[in-house]
């Protein structure tokens, strides 16, 4: 949003931590998958593709996406769920196709015999999240935006034309405030006198494993159709793995729990027969959802000049181009991308909670 607004407005990014991206944004699994988040999030993800794959000249010289592909898998009892997945997303022009066991074995050697159902989603790609985030910050800075770090917003009041915002680095005045506080979105709303929308941060664990198996770096994203795990290649002989955990947590600097790491490994070992050499890294982050699991962006219906941009759950990176363009559009910045302009933002408005 800072990058979209800075060319026409004076923008100050207020960040509580010492650097931007310390929380959810710096902890993602870094993939772009059109089906991820479900059919009501998919329009935002699909519409973001062009900007991620072929960024505008001047924003970035290179693509933020790299080939990956996904296999959504299940066992015999999941066959109907896999079929439903294919039906749902084919109807939405996402390329998904059934893959039988023989083809699963061709694509990935080592699946245990009970994994017989699969759908391929070839458009799934990796996002270079660090490069994308830096490109947004750099573009905002070039347009004059300032970043104030180590500054937590602690109080605010509106005098009828300006917000007076008290931070741990002093007071700031602004005619408009945009709440992009992730897991703290409802806390920040309360500070500005806005009604919380019911955000729930959910802990998600990630583990990097080194394997004693010949696993290519290009291993597709392999995701359980029922949402029990996903893993993808992360360099020769390595994978990133998640048990797809969703533990409700208060907003905090979250760390991984040993039980979730063990659960991840247990689920992984039930899928493939690759021996594990080492747990090289583990981390956790908060994915923050509104009650209907759709993002929340738009002007607050009651509080003047208070704009929401929260609830991006597990899809905030892959939808960032579309969400920011649609929200900036509501604030008067023309949308210069036809695919994004075609997305109806109504389902994502905070007004749905009023
Ligand atoms: C493990 C994991 C895997 C994920 N994988 C993917 C993926 O593969 N693809 C994808 O698209 N998405 C993924 N996501 C989701 C994505 O990371 C988030 O949707 C996105 O990063 C949310 O961005 P944000 O800026 O809203 O939140 P954050 O990055 O958390 O930023 C919010 C910021 O607000 C600041 N803040 C809060 N309160 C205050 C205050 N009072 N004053 C000042 N500053 C404040 C915080 O310090 C924080 O830096 C994943 C998330 C996790 C945790």
Image (tube, rainbow, N blue to C red):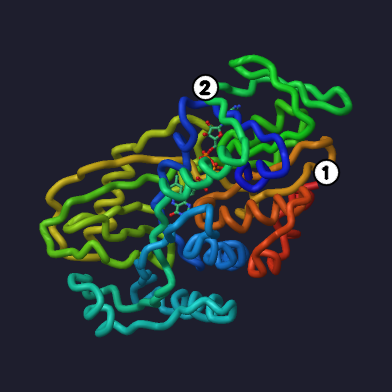
Residue 305 lies, with reference to residue 122, above or below; the image says: above
Q: Quadrant of residue 292?
A: bottom right
Name the quadrant of the N terminus: top right
Residue at 18% over, 70% down = 110
Q: Is mark 1 within 8 Å of ligand 1?
A: no
Residue drawn 31% across the image and 53% down it: 241
Relative side of 146 to 272, left or right? right
Foreground tag (2 vs 1): 2
Query: In what element is the residue under mark 2?
Result: loop
Image point (30%, 78%), residue name = 116
> Which residue is nearer to you in this view: 201 or 44?
44
Viewer-proximal residue among 244 and 315? 315
Whether label 2 lies within 8 Å of ligand 1 gets the answer no
Left or right of 2? Residue 77 is left
Looking at this rendering, what residue extends furthest in the right direction? 160
Instruction: Report x, y in % for residue 118.
Output: 36, 77
Q: Quadrant of residue 270?
A: bottom left
Residue 121 falls left or right of residue 102: right
Residue 96 on image: x %, y %: 45, 79
Characterize the local packing of mark 1: few (<14), some (14-19) or many (20 or more) Cα atoms within 10 angstroms: some
Where's residue 248, x and y in %? 50, 40
The relative height of residue 129 versus residue 284 in the rendered view (above or below) is: below
| Closer to the camera in the image, 127 or 279 | 127
Residue denoted by label 2: 150
Residue 58 locus on image (x, y percent): 53, 54
Tell me, for residue 100, which label it has, or none. Answer: none
Report which residue position mark 1 lands on: 301
Gap between marks 2 and 1 measured at Cα: 30 Å
Mark 2 surroundings within 10 Å by alpha-carbon count, few (fewer than 14), some (14 through 19), many (20 or more):
some
Q: Earlier in the sequence, mark 2 or mark 1?
A: 2
Residue found at x 30% / y 60%: 232
């Amino acid at each position: 949003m800072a990058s979209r607004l800075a060319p026409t407005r004076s923008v100050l990014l207020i960040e509580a931590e010492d650097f931007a991206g310390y929380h959810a944004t710096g902890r993602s699994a870094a993939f772009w998958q059109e089906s991820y988040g479900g059919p009501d999030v998919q329009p935002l993800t699909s519409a973001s593709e062009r900007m991620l794959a072929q960024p505008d000249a001047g924003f970035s010289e290179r693509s933020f996406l790299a080939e990956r592909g996904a296999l959504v898998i299940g066992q015999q009892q999941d066959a109907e769920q896999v079929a439903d997945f294919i039906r749902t997303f084919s109807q939405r022009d996402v390329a998904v196709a059934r893959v039988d066991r023989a083809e699963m074995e061709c694509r990935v050697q080592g699946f245990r015999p009970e994994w017989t159902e699969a759908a391929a989603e070839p458009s799934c790609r990796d996002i270079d999240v660090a490069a994308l985030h830096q490109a947004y910050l750099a573009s905002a800075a070039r347009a004059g935006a300032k970043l104030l770090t180590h500054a937590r917003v602690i109080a605010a009041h509106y005098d009828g034309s300006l917000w007076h915002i008290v931070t741990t680095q002093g007071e700031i005045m602004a005619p408009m405030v945009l709440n992009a506080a992730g897991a703290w979105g409802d806390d920040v709303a309360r500070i500005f006198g806005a009604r919380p929308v019911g955000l729930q941060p959910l802990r998600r664990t990630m583990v990097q494993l080194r394997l004693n198996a010949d696993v290519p770096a290009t291993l597709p994203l392999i995701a359980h159709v029922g949402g029990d795990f996903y893993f993808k290649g992360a360099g020769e002989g390595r994978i990133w793995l998640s048990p797809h955990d969703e533990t409700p947590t208060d907003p905090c600097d979250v760390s991984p729990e040993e039980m979730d790491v063990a659960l991840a490994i247990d689920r992984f070992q039930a899928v493939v027969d690759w021996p594990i050499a080492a747990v090289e890294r583990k981390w956790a982050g908060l994915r923050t959802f509104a009650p209907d699991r759709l993002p929340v962006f738009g002007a607050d219906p009651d509080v003047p000049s208070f704009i929401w941009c929260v609830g991006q759950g597990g899809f905030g990176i892959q939808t960032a181009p579309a969400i920011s363009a649609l929200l900036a559009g509501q604030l008067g910045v023309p949308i210069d991308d036809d695919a994004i302009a075609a997305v109806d933002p109504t389902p994502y408005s905070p007004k749905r909670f009023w």
